[in-house]
Image (spheres, rainbow, N blue to C red):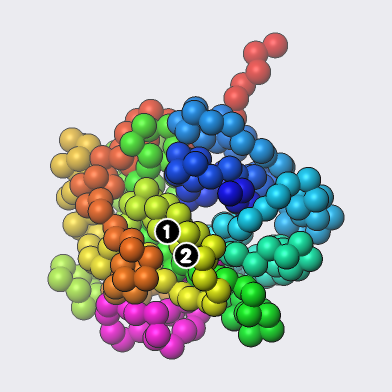
């Protein structure tokens, strides 16, 4: 079976491509390198020990997508490609709406043109907006508090309308909680541009000495130690969830949302302490004001995915930290672009 993976050189996409290849799927990888580097292609081949088809292409160019479908037999699509920085989405909303929404509309239109109706979509727990209850389950009312989150919610609604228009569609909406960690080889990992926005890549850069100290955004939330609580999930567990969702969409039709989380909430201080134990490094930090737009507590009810996808996260917080640390130590500057010595 041949799977088109859009955004396949990104953080979660690359880990999922390795698992797809290892599970015997053939893949066609599409990426425009807007938030990743060509080096990832070689790393995926190195780890999986298999070759695959790759196109540097942009979902905003519909002709490129048509050409890929003309040249390859595609049985299903896993759609990762999209801009994903919450803060950036507030400052450049048009880029986010155009890239994420138009790109998805182009993809789905070409899929329908070629009679390909199996789709796994990279959604996010951000579509739960601010809830006054945890754990979060899939039937809660949805909302978004920033343009990035609104693109995810709009795409979920678009895909629901697509299924209503044509019940041949078979779609899984995967709502990620907080992906962290890295491949155990230390050869794939999270490679944020510039200063990291997210907690774990920031901590790893403090631990390796690239950043002086961590700012803890608030310790006056109604949580166990006052700091923000999140459902951190190892990227390898998250990637396996995509394989399970792919297997389901290829044997059924319909549209379903699934929480991909551990169901366990950990605070910022829990993360700091666990990371210190895993790395042997102290993490200097300072308590500062809350970050605008942050919520105090968020963690998943993962029971629907456990039941319907036969999937459950296995890796604990310590494994998430030790794998993140190995990646950072082995790749102090991420996938630095290859320097051609002349
Ligand atoms: C986690 C906790 C912060 C950085 C975001 C996106 C979400 C999803 C995952 C795509 C919070 C605290 C953080 C720092 C800190 N992305 N923190 N100091 O905000 O839960 O979710 O990433 O799907 O859509 O919004 O993740 O890692 O930024 O924050 O104290 O330097 O760490 O306040 O409590 P977040 P995060």
Residue 48 horizontal side relative to residue 62, left or right: left
Q: Secondary structure at mark 2?
A: helix
Question: Is 137 included in the stretch rendered in magenta?
Answer: yes
Magenta stretch prevailing secondary structure: loop
The extreme front residue here reads 251
For this view, does 330 lie left or right of residue 341? left
Where does residue 342 sit, x and y in percent of width and height? 70, 11
Magenta stretch: give its range. 121-147
Other-residue count near label 2 (Cα within 10 Å), few / some / many at <14 / 14–19 / ≥20:
some
Where residue 38 appears, x then y in whole percent? Answer: 62, 35
Q: Residue sitting at 28 percent across and 84 percent down?
A: 133
Q: Is residue 63 magenta?
A: no
Identify which residue, 247 or 7, lies in the foreground.
247
| Element type at mark 1 | helix
Please identify the quarter of the rendering in which residue 66 is found.
Answer: bottom right
Task: Say if mark 1 contacts mark 2, CB within 8 Å.
Answer: yes
Q: Is residue 249 above or below residue 280?
A: below
Q: Which residue is mark 2?
A: 248
Taking the spot 63% from the left edge, 80% from the top edge, the residue there is 167
Pointer 1 residue = 244
Residue 207 or 189: which is nearer the viewer? 189
Identified at 34% across, 79% down, the residue is: 137
Q: Distance between the Cα atoms at labels 1 and 2? A: 6 Å
């Amino acid at each position: 079976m041949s799977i088109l993976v859009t955004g396949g050189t990104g953080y979660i996409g690359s880990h999922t491509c390795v698992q797809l290849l290892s599970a015997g799927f053939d893949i066609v990888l599409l990426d425009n390198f807007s938030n990743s580097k060509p080096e990832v292609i070689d790393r995926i081949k190195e780890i999986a020990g298999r070759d695959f088809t790759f196109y540097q292409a942009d979902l905003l160019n519909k002709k490129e997508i048509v050409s890929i479908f003309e040249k390859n037999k595609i049985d299903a699509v896993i759609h990762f490609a999209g801009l994903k920085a919450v803060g950036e989405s507030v400052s450049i909303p048009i880029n986010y709406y155009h890239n994420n929404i138009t790109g998805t509309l182009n993809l789905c239109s070409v899929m329908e043109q070629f009679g390909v109706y199996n789709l796994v979509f990279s959604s996010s727990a951000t579509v739960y907006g601010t809830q006054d209850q945890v754990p979060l389950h899939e039937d809660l009312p949805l909302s978004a508090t920033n343009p990035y989150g609104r693109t995810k919610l709009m795409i979920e609604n678009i895909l629901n309308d697509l299924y209503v228009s044509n019940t041949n569609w078979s779609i899984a909406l995967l709502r990620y909680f907080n992906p962290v960690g890295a491949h155990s080889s230390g050869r794939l990992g999270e490679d944020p541009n510039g200063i990291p926005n997210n907690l774990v890549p920031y901590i790893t850069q403090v631990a390796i000495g690239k950043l002086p100290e961590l700012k803890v955004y608030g310790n006056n939330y109604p949580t166990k130690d006052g700091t923000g609580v999140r459902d951190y999930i190892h990227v390898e567990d998250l990637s396996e969830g995509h394989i399970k969702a792919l297997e389901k969409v290829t044997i059924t039709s319909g549209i379903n949302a699934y929480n991909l989380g551990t169901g366990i909430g950990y605070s910022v201080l829990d993360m700091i302490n666990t990371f210190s134990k895993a790395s042997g490094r102290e993490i200097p930090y300072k308590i500062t004001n809350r970050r605008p737009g942050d919520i105090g507590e968020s963690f998943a009810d993962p029971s629907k995915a456990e039941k319907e996808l036969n999937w459950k996260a296995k890796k604990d917080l310590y494994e998430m930290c030790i794998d993140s640390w190995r990646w950072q130590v082995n790749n102090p500057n991420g996938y630095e672009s290859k320097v051609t010595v002349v």
